[in-house]
Amino acid sequence: MTEAQVIAARNGAQVALQQLLSGKRPASVSYAQGDGSRSVSFSNADQAQLRQNIREFNILLGVECRRRPMRPYFR
């Protein structure tokens, strides 16, 4: 993936996470037309999966590193 594609994917994941957290993302939508009714349903991504995707995109961009946190070691 190019850098522009990674940035676009990260921005999309951030928007999806924000919509999921604010409750603005519908699970199913139905509407009726003159010739019949239509129904569309979306699968909801979970919060942990979206956060992991954003973290991986940030690592690809070099914004976030994979270093473990430093912890004191006592002898």
Image: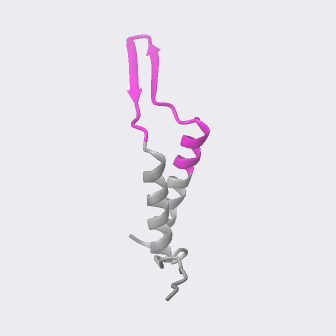
Q: Residue at x 40, y 27 (%)?
A: 40
For the residue pair 48 and 42, the one nearer the viewer reads as: 48
* Extreme-front residue of the structure: 75
Q: Residue at x 49, y 56 (%)?
A: 51
Give the color scheme: rainbow, by chain, secondary structure or one colour: one colour
For the residue pair 73 and 23, the one nearer the viewer reads as: 73
User: What is the tally of numbered marks visible in this picture?
Assistant: 0
Q: Position of residue 39 (x, y in %)?
A: 39, 22
| The magenta segment | 15-44
Residue 20 falls left or right of residue 28:
right
Q: Position of residue 59 (x, y in %)?
A: 47, 73
Q: Position of residue 34 (x, y in %)?
A: 43, 10
Q: Residue at x 39, y 37 (%)?
A: 43
Identify whether 9 is placed above or below 30.
Answer: below
* Extreme-right residue of the structure: 22
Identify whether 36 is placed above or below 41.
Answer: above
Q: Residue at x 49, y 89 (%)?
A: 75
For the residue pair 33 and 25, the one nearer the viewer reads as: 25
The quadrant the N terminus occupies is bottom left
Residue 28 falls left or right of residue 15:
left
* Extreme-bottom residue of the structure: 75
Identify whether 72 is placed above or below 41.
Answer: below
Q: Position of residue 60 (x, y in %)?
A: 45, 73
Reply yes or no: does residue 19 show up in magenta.
Answer: yes
